[in-house]
Image (cartoon, rainbow, N blue to C red):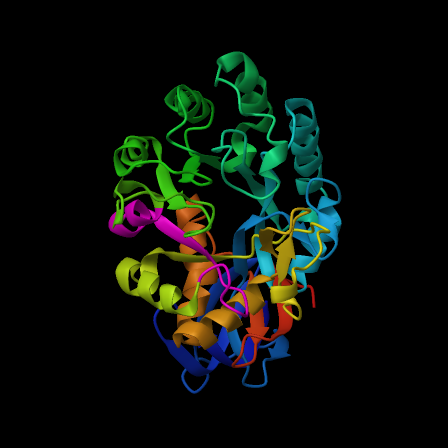
Amino acid sequence: MIAIKNATLVMRDHLIPEAVLFVEDGKITGFGEMRTTPIPENCEIIDAQNQFVGPGLVDIHCHAGDCHWFNQEPLEAAKYHLSHGTTSILATLYFDTPKADLLKQTALVQAAMKQPEGTNIVGIYMEAPYMNPKFGANRVNNPWKGPICKEDYQELIEAAGNDVRVWVVAPERENIESFVQYAKACNPNVRFAVGHSEASPQQIEALMPYGLCIGTHHTNATGTIINYPGCRGVCVDETVNYNRDIYAEMICDSRGIHVDPYMQRLIRKIKGDDRLILISDACWFQGSTPEDYIGVTDLCFDFQGQIAGSKLTLDVACRNMMKHTGASIVDVFKFASYNPSRAVGFLDRGEIAVGKRADLVFVDPWMNIQRVILNGVVKQ
């Protein structure tokens, strides 16, 4: 048994200072204030030195780590994010890939998930194949613009199997419901997200009974319907804000480019802290940085100079969220661990509770990672 002492435990809605936490066989077996919780003899002692100890971070939307794409070097990408406290990550594949290549990438990630070094790769976030061709990075290279037909998607859905936790769809695309129905039949636990879309509220809400419960990178790569010149209508972002059952992903970069800090505060006020998810959407496009963004280090640009995701890790995203919104350390652990876990059905992690996975991070007050424990094993 491991006893982590002198910790400030970050719980779902409060802190426990001067605490001890017990880990055995990869699970949390107990915790409490040190003054009332004796440490058994023969424990392996880890002194947290009054650092915050919270649940491991859970990134459900990530394409790359440092200079490594998940669709090419998944183990290297996973290792990089683990060093930044992400103990569970969904390798994200993208729509700018023909079917044969997307099948190869899926198999590559599935193989990596079985390797000891890929323990923190816990599934696939499929930001493909059926997006709206008008939206998204590298959209000029979208090979999935044609009609949606079973002959095209059946092999991909079956090959991905239960490893896909989320399929992103543009609900306005003709015949998208047939794709959603088949994906759900093959994997009943899968979730769906609305992304790269200009769908109406009615088109989005029609897919919610199938498990559409996530808004992909909220306020990015979505359209705006104009009811009348000068009169704004309602579209994807408004639908995500309105529906309580839809989680809102946010890319929280240092300058507030993806989501303006005022918008971050507004979304938080509308959605509430139980429906916000911080994601990295980390990529590794090699496009040149436009002059207006010189000096910004956590944004990524495609070859047309368009913003193409970020170069974030979740620890940095948490720190940015604290800065932009005044969120507490308890809040950001909820946004980056508990909420994403619940959104995709990982009920065994994302919080400090007896019986949960011992995925833990030690951090300072500004979310700088000091130590990482994955499934009860010290990794850093």
Give x and y (percent) for residue 135. Answer: 50, 40
Nearest the viewer among 274 and 174 is: 174
Nearest the viewer among 352 and 139 is: 139
Left or right: where does residue 36 sit relative to residue 226?
right
Residue 97 versus residue 252 in the image, above or below: above
Q: Which residue is pictured at 70% across the width and 58% down the height?
A: 80
Q: Is residue 250 magenta?
A: yes
Q: Spot the residue most to the top.
A: 151
The magenta-colored residue range is 237-259
Q: Is residue 169 magenta?
A: no
Q: Quadrant of the N terminus?
A: bottom right
Nearest the viewer among 241 and 111 is: 241
Q: Which residue is pictured at 65% across the width and 64% down the height?
A: 291
Q: Which residue is pictured at 60% across the width and 24% down the height?
A: 159
Q: Spot the residue most to the front.
A: 229
Q: Which residue is pictured at 34% across the width and 70% down the height?
A: 13
Left or right: where does residue 322 sit relative to residue 269?
right
Residue 232 versus residue 296 in the image, above or below: above
Give x and y (percent) for residue 166. Answer: 48, 38
Please identify the quarter of the rendering in which residue 329 is found: bottom left
